[in-house]
Every structure is written in C-alpha cells, then in structure tokens.
C-alpha cells in the first residue's frame, strides 16, 4: 500500500532552480544549504541531484548532518561546511572528516587547531562574524583582534569569512545596508593585514533577491536554501525566476451529502447554510496542513479549487466539493502544487499562517512519504 499522503519532489525543477541562481550571481559560487535533512525532504536525493548539476559547496547546521552528507558523496569530496556553531566534543571527529568549521570565538579556534595538530592535518575554517544577527559569532568590532590571534595558531587554513542578515527580506531595510557596509569594511581591513580569504559570503536567499550588492565583489559566494524549492519570503522581491519543486498530495476518504445546519469539525467553526457535498480528505495537521487553513484554505480536487470548511484535525480535513462532479473515495487531492493553469504553493499557506515557506516545508509530518521525480532526467 502506498502512503495516504505524499510529497512529490521534482528533482529536475530543483536543478533548474540551481542553474538559475548560479546564472544570476555568476561568477560567484553557490553554496546549497541542505540542513535538517534538506528541510525534511530527504538529503540524499537532493545532494545527488545538485552534485550532478555541478554544485561543490554544501552547508549544514550540525555534525550529524555533515556526516550524513559525506556518506551520500562517498568517494567524492565536495566542500561540506557547518554554518552555525561547533561544540567542543564535536570538533575532533569533524576535523578528521574534513568538514569546514565555523570560528565563532578564539576558544573554538584553539580547540580546532589542537584537534588538527593531533590528527596531523589542516582544518579549514571560516570566521563567523556577527554584524547584527545577535545569535552566534564574533562581534564585528572585535573581529580583527580575534582573527590576528587565530592566524597564529597551527594547522588552520583560514579559508573564509561570512555573516548573516536578520532583515534581508525587507528590500530597503537600512539595518541590512549598514550590516553589509560593516562587513565589507572588515573584509577590506583584513585584506590590508594580509588575510586572503578565498570564500567571502553574506547573502542567503533573501539577500540574493533584495540586496544584489551581496552578489558582487568582494563577495565570492552566496548561500541558498528556500529558493532551491521555488519559494520566497512573503515580504521581499522575487528577483530570481525559480519554479515550485514540491507537490503535496493525499486522497479522498469519504464523500457525503450533508443537510443544512450541519456543523463541521472540532469547535463547530463552520455551519452549512444549505445542503452540501462534503469530502473528507486523508490529511491533517499531523501531515503538515496548518490549522491556519481552517475555513480559509483551498485544495484541488477533480481539477478545481475546493474550499476547506471546518477546523483541520490531526488526520483529516473537510472540503466543500459541491461544484465537483463524481468525487469518490480514493480520488487524488492536491494540497499544494500545480493543477492545470492554477497553483497553490507553500508560500500561499505561509501567508495564511503568518509565517514563511521554511515553516511549511519543515512541518510536513513523518508519515508523509517523500517521493522524488525527475531522476531519470538527471541520469540516476
């Protein structure tokens, strides 16, 4: 039996999106962020597809993700970089594995250096600079002093320097512009002191779309995650012409003719004003349908948009199918994705929920089967 709920991942569309991003930022490199198991969608197929398309730079959040990615590549050796932090007990195995590590403070750099000496290897590191995110890293005003001390440590290759923006989804945000200026000034000052960084990056998906200066020199690389899926933050520009990669499908469980006055679901939030044909579909909030779609969202059944009526429950959702002929149990339901000339996207759901597409994608439940398509096009 196949799963009741499936998310179909179009790998060919993923690769087309990667190619469009590369073309947009050329000659800068593109680092593909595949943290959290490629946002819960399955890192193995994602990594294989992107590697086949020419990507050699990958980013993750923590060591177990890095190890999983290295297992995917086996004998190949692309760059795998931890973008957040590295804890003391994680350093030695990551150094031995050849993972690029973040330097968030001098103490961390000393531990990485010591581990590299013991392993008789050289560890690649990137200075993580806090220019205003307020989460992790070396404060920009203290960075030069830390960088000088780190440069004196043995067995370190100070390959890169990077930062991150909390407001890059706002195209005219003055705070982001100040961050960019602060970071570029630091890079220029470091260059004057003899630092020759091969990888300089600040732009993630939002900045690529809204702050094109982060895709030009002195920057040498950008990072992208959500744009690979064809999604954007709802507030910013959509400068990249990327396409949706994901389709979430389920099936109809039952169709009934219900009389006027019938109330639907927990809380009785919807009352039928007239006799109505209602389909109950086999997906709910445990599968990733946000409660915010209650009485507001739509799905596709029989080629038509059908309104969600009644509160979404854990396993089921009720939908008005009065205008759809011959709906029956087992029929396909497209929760988000393309249906003819119409489309419902994770961005649409995010707008209703007051969030962003990452939240929608990462919320797809564990019983949702991940199905990849387009593999033959890519040669595997």
Image (cartoon, rainbow, N blue to C red):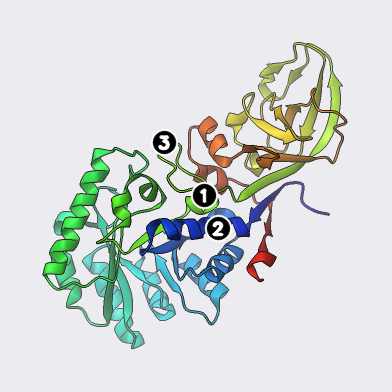
Marks 1 and 2: CB-CB under 8 Å? Answer: yes
Q: Which sits earlier in the primary sequence, circle 1 or circle 3?
A: 3
Q: Quadrant of residue 327?
A: top right
Marks 1 and 3: CB-CB under 8 Å? Answer: no
Left or right for 271, reference 260: left
Disc number placed over residue 136 in the picture, else none: none
Between 106 and 178, the residue placed more toward the observer is: 178
Please, what secondary structure does the residue beneath circle 1 have? loop
Q: Which residue is mark 3?
A: 235
Q: Which sits earlier in the primary sequence, circle 2 or circle 3?
A: 2
Please, what secondary structure does the residue beneath circle 2 have? helix
Q: Marks 1 and 3, Cα distance to the nearest angstrom?
A: 17 Å
Please, what secondary structure does the residue beneath circle 3 have? loop
Q: Residue at x 28, y 77 (%)?
A: 157
Disc number placed over residue 242 in the picture, else none: 1
Give how far across and how far down residue 124 sits, in percent.
33, 75
- Examine the rendered structure and indicate whether residue 110 appears above or below residue 273: below
Residue 54 shows up from this direction? yes
Give how far across and how far down residue 64 sits, in percent.
49, 67
Residue 84 shows up from this direction? no
- Examine the rendered structure and indicate whether residue 220 appears above or below residue 337: below
Give how far across and how far down residue 187 sits, in percent.
19, 62
Q: Residue at x 67, y 60 (%)?
A: 374
Q: Which residue is mark 2?
A: 16
User: In which quadrant is the N terminus drawn?
Assistant: bottom right
Left or right for 326, reference 240: right
Say few, some or many: other residues with alpha carbon within 10 Å of mark 2 (under 14 / 14 to 19 / 20 or more).
some
Q: Quadrant of residue 163?
A: bottom left
Q: Marks 2 and 3, Cα distance to the nearest angstrom?
A: 24 Å
Q: Which sits earlier in the primary sequence, circle 1 or circle 2?
A: 2
């Amino acid at each position: 039996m196949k799963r009741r709920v499936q998310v179909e991942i179009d790998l060919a569309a993923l690769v087309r999106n990667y190619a469009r991003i590369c073309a947009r930022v050329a000659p800068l490199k593109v680092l593909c962020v595949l943290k959290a198991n490629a946002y819960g969608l399955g890192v193995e197929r994602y990594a294989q597809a992107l590697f086949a398309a020419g990507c050699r730079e990958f980013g993750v959040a923590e060591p177990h993700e890095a190890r999983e990615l290295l297992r995917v590549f086996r004998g190949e050796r692309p760059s795998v970089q931890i973008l957040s932090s590295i804890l003391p007990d994680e350093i030695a195995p990551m150094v031995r594995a050849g993972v690029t590590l973040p330097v968030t403070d001098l103490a961390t750099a000393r531990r990485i250096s010591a581990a590299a000496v013991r392993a008789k290897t050289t560890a690649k590191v990137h200075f993580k600079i806090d220019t205003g995110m307020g989460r992790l890293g070396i404060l920009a005003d203290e960075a030069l002093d830390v960088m000088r001390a780190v440069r004196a440590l043995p067995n370190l290759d100070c390959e890169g320097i990077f930062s991150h923006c909390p407001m890059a989804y706002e195209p005219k945000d003055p705070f982001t512009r100040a961050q960019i200026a602060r970071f570029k000034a630091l890079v220029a000052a470091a260059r004057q002191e003899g630092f020759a960084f091969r990888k300089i990056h600040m732009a993630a998906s939002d900045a690529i779309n809204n702050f094109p200066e982060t895709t030009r020199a002195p920057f040498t690389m950008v990072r992208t995650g959500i744009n690979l899926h064809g999604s954007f933050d709802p507030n910013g520009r959509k400068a990249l012409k990327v396409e949706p990669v994901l389709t979430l499908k389920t099936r109809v469980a039952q169709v009934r003719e219900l009389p006027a006055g019938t109330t639907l679901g927990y809380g009785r939030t919807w009352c039928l004003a007239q006799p109505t044909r209602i389909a109950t579909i086999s997906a709910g909030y445990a599968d990733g349908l946000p409660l915010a779609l209650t009485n507001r969202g739509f799905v596709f059944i029989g080629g038509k948009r059908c309104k969600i009526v009644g509160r979404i429950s854990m396993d089921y959702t009720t939908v008005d199918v009065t205008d759809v002929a011959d709906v029956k149990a087992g029929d396909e339901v497209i929760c988000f994705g393309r249906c003819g000339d119409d489309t419902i996207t994770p961005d649409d759901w995010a707008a209703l929920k007051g969030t962003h597409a990452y939240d929608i994608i990462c919320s797809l439940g564990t019983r949702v089967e991940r199905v990849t398509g387009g593999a033959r096009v890519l040669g595997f």
